[in-house]
Image (cartoon, grey):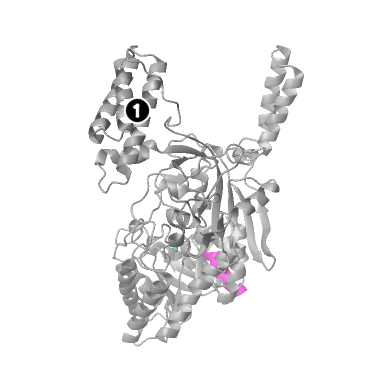
């Protein structure tokens, strides 16, 4: 076997493909992140050790504000470049949709960098609007208000004009128009309005249902004309500035944007012709992320880059406007995923692994043992000589195993015999797998071996809390060990989480060509912790996370690059057990009182001593204050 190398790990895990220039492996064989894109690399293994020394345990989220800043600069930058190339006269006015990651520190970090490009916020509900009103303080940045609106929402948005905010109310439903007219008349504040168009063209990808004629959002051509007429009647048509559409998230094919833009630019021109001043063209979100590095139109990838996206947007708008002889509008993007995804990495422990008993010793089978055992023993011996017909061996082994189960159920073989049969069976399967693995053609039924022989690695995390999209929509994320990458990983495994839910597992893994059914990891070394990283979890995962099995928010740590090297900026402790219990209405007091009553009753009945009762109360209380995940006391 050729010696393993860091280069082989890079290739095996596809790091150069999906890494977006952010990830690499250092000489120690540890995964590194380069948040500023320069050679300054943070060794994730050392970083995790430093964090653990401070008493903060995985699972945890590592947030790298420098990465967020670079993503913002990238998006604003490609638009500026393309503007120059096309001699485009409008400005770039990006906004970040809060729903993608509402976490306060994340949003404050965003707003800190946003001033430079005058980027703003997009909101879709009252709570989001209130956050944006309080935090966004840049008179040149837009605050785009989407979502369904009631009078309170509209009133807050209109009054914010008096603070110099550039708030735009985007009309999503006909019924909102009357409320806007009414509130605006009452407050004597003229609104700044947009229209969300329902485009006919259905997009592709996972969220195709959020576009097309049947989508939940936006106004049909007929509704748009009605809105224009109503606004004209109320002398408000000169408040209509913006056209908005949003064709779904993670748009995997550039063609989809092109088609949407064709329809939307026509719509923009028509609205201008009907007398609206317009001036803002809002292309919504949807700019995707290449999670698997394949650069294809798979759902976890995209077949274009930011630059091509910007080119398509700008050229489509420019040519439509010039044809109609109207000014180039400012361009608004609502990219959320493309901005927020890259800056967060999830890290968790692998606690242990279980799998078929391949390491067990060969059971001793004598010729007068049960015939199933003898047959299986001989089959294994034959396979070990490299002879034996594989398909026949496969069929026989499966049949004998099945018969073994029946014999056990009928009381014809005992538990020891059944266990011996299993050991022989799995060893035979492993040999068959080794043999067919590298063949160009693998018989269909034997393909299942990859999955059958994979081990289950138990991970200190809840998918429902930390990777909800992996569970709910089968979203793929890259997953890499953060250590020992100079060593060949010999185990193939699927990942299972701490929840008592059989859905709490990851059994598909990214790969350049066909997806993998198992992930290669290193055999655990007793007494040494082993960590896996899941990059690209900064968009949607945190807030969609759920309290399944009452596993709470994980710890989070912010790391920035300073001239002296990486700096741990901020540590945010995750939920304690008692905090999670509060969400479901159990108070600490009530739980402690109930357990104390039980202790007292049992002390009286002399089933527990006062000393042990005291100890139980202390453990109970410490656990209430502790982390919901498994804690190491190494
Ligand atoms: C969710 C959403 C976005 C963000 O989409 P991404 O795919 O994350 O860029 C933008 N605009 C609207 C209206 C949305 O609902």
Q: Quarter of the image holding residue 201?
A: bottom left
Q: What percent of the width, then of the height, locates residue 399?
A: 26, 25
- The residue sitting at 55% across, 57% down in the picture is 344
Seen from the viewer's position, the closer of residues 47 and 54 is 47
Q: Position of residue 27 (x, y in %)?
A: 57, 58
- Residue linked to disc 1: 425
In this view, 152 is above or below 524: below
Q: Which residues are magenta?
A: 154-164
- Point out the residue furthest to the right here: 611
Q: Residue furthest front?
A: 385
Residue 152: in sight, yes or no? no
Residue 129 in percent (x, y) is at 55, 62
Image quarter for ligand 1 equals bottom left
Q: Main secondary structure of the magenta part?
A: helix
Using the image as rendered, state which of residue 7 and residue 482 is in the foreground.
7
How many numbered marks appear?
A: 1
Give the class, few, some or many, for how many residues have Cα within 10 Å of label 1's Cα (few <14, many ≥20). many
Is residue 594 inside the magenta stretch? no
Q: Is residue 163 within the magenta segment? A: yes
Looking at the image, which residue is at 38% across and 36% down?
A: 453
Q: Secondary structure at mark 1?
A: helix
- Label 1 near ligand 1 (CB < 8 Å): no
Asked if 380 appears above or below 101 in the picture, the reply is above
């Amino acid at each position: 076997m050729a010696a393993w190398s860091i280069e082989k790990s890079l290739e095996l895990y596809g790091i150069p493909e999906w890494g977006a220039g952010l990830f690499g492996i250092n000489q120690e064989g540890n995964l590194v992140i380069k948040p500023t894109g320069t050679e300054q690399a943070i060794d994730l293994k050392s970083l995790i050790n430093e964090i653990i020394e401070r008493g903060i345990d995985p699972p945890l989220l590592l947030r790298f504000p420098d990465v967020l800043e670079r993503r913002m600069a990238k998006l604003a930058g490609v638009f500026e470049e393309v503007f120059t190339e096309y001699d485009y006269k409008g400005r770039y006015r990006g906004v970040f949709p809060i729903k993608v990651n509402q976490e306060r520190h994340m949003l404050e970090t965003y707003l800190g960098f946003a001033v430079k490009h005058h980027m703003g916020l997009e909101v879709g509900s009252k709570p989001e609007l209130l956050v944006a009103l309080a935090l966004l303080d840049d008179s040149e940045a837009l605050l785009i208000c989407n979502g369904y609106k009631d009078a309170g929402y509209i009133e807050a948005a209109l009054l914010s004009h008096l603070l110099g905010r550039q708030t735009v109310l985007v009309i999503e439903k006909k019924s909102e128009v009357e409320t806007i007219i009414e509130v605006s008349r009452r407050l004597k504040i003229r609104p700044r309005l947009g229209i969300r168009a329902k485009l006919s063209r259905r997009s592709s990808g996972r969220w195709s249902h959020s576009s097309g004629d049947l989508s939940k959002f936006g106004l049909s051509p007929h509704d748009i004309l009605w809105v224009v007429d109503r606004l004209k009647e109320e002398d408000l048509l000169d408040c209509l500035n913006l056209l908005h559409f949003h064709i779904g998230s993670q748009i995997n094919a550039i063609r989809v944007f092109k088609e949407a833009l064709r329809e939307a630019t026509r719509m923009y021109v028509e609205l201008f012709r009907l007398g609206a001043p317009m001036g803002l063209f809002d292309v919504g979100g949807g700019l995707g992320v290449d999670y698997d590095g394949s650069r294809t139109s798979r759902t976890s990838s995209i077949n274009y880059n930011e630059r091509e996206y910007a080119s398509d947007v700008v050229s489509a708008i420019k040519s439509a406007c010039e044809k109609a002889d109207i000014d180039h509008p400012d361009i608004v993007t609502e990219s959320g995923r493309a901005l927020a995804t890259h800056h967060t990495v999830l890290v968790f422990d692998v606690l242990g692994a279980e799998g078929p008993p391949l390491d067990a010793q060969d059971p001793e089978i004598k010729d007068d043992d049960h015939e199933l055992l003898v047959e299986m023993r001989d089959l294994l011996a034959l396979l070990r000589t490299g002879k034996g017909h594989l398909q026949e061996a496969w069929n026989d082994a499966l049949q004998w195993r099945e018969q073994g189960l029946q014999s056990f159920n009928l009381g014809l073989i005992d538990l020891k015999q059944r266990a011996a049969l299993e050991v022989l069976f799995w060893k035979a399967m492993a040999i068959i797998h080794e043999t067919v693995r590298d063949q160009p053609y693998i018989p269909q039924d034997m393909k299942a071996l990859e999955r059958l022989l994979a081990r289950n690695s138990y991970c200190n995390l809840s998918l429902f809390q930390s990777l909800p999209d992996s569970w709910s929509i089968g979203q793929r994320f890259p997953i890499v060990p953060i250590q020992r990458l100079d060593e060949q990983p010999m185990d193939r495994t699927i990942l299972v989480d701490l929840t008592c839910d059989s859905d709490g597992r990851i059994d598909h893994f990214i790969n350049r060509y066909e997806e993998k059914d198992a992930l290669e990891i290193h055999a655990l070394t007793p007494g040494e912790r082993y960590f896996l990283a899941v990059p690209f979890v900064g968009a949607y995962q945190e807030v969609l996370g759920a309290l399944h099995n009452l596993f709470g928010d994980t710890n989070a740590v912010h790391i920035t690059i300073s001239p002296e090297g990486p700096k741990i900026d901020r540590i945010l402790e995750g939920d304690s057990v008692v905090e999670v219990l509060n969400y479901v209405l159990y108070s600490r007091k009530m739980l402690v009182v109930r357990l104390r009553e039980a202790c007292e009753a049992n002390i009286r009945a002399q089933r527990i001593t006062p000393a042990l009762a005291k100890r139980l109360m202390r453990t109970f209380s410490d656990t209430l204050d502790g982390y919901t995940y498994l804690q190491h006391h190494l």
